[in-house]
Amino acid sequence: AHAGQQEEENEKNFGGSEGGYGGKKEMKMAPCPDNGWQYIDPAGNIQGPFPIEKMRTWHRHNFFYADLPMRSDPVDAFLPFGQLFPPGEKPFQGRVMRCRQNARNGLPMPLRHVQ
């Protein structure tokens, strides 16, 4: 068996049926990171990364809406803001839902090798 095969099995069991599009995704709760927060604005542009303090301030001013695509780390997939913090979790305080993309090395795009 390949070394990577076992890892795939673990991801399958962990991720459930959540990633019907774009391959498997691993969903898990994790502590909120201090930096690396990004969101996609209504024009489709990725904004950030921002520190958590700035995100807390914007949240207090109701800047974020439930469907706003957001992530807490550039290696994660974007999730709607409403899914990042399940009921009982205060946004940007304790834990956040992390959704790791099924990409090589966790990077969203392949690196170009300089020749």
Image (cartoon, grey):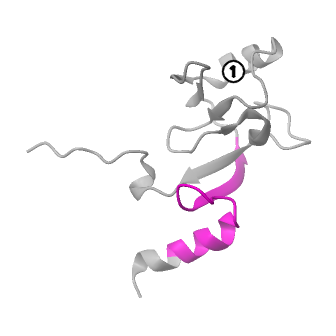
Q: Position of residue 99 (x, y in %)?
A: 63, 50
Q: Which range of residues does the magenta coloring cover? A: 7-31
Task: Locate residue 37: give its quadrant.
Answer: top right
Residue 7 in the figure: left or right of residue 90: left
Task: Locate residue 2: give its quadrant.
Answer: bottom left
- The correct choice, above or below, for 36 with respect to 83 in the image is above
Residue shown at 41%/79% (left/top)?
3
Q: Position of residue 41 (x, y in %)?
A: 60, 20
Residue 21 in the figure: left or right of residue 88: left
- The correct choice, above or below, for 38 with respect to 21 in the image is above
Mark 1 highlights which residue? 55
Residue shown at 74%/31% (left/top)?
67
Residue 93 in the figure: left or right of residue 36: right
Task: Locate residue 88: give its quadrant.
Answer: top right
Q: Amino acid at mark 1?
A: Met
Q: Position of residue 57 (x, y in %)?
A: 74, 14
- Which residue sits furthest top? 61
Name the foreground residue: 52 vs 43.
43
Name the foreground residue: 78 vs 35.
78
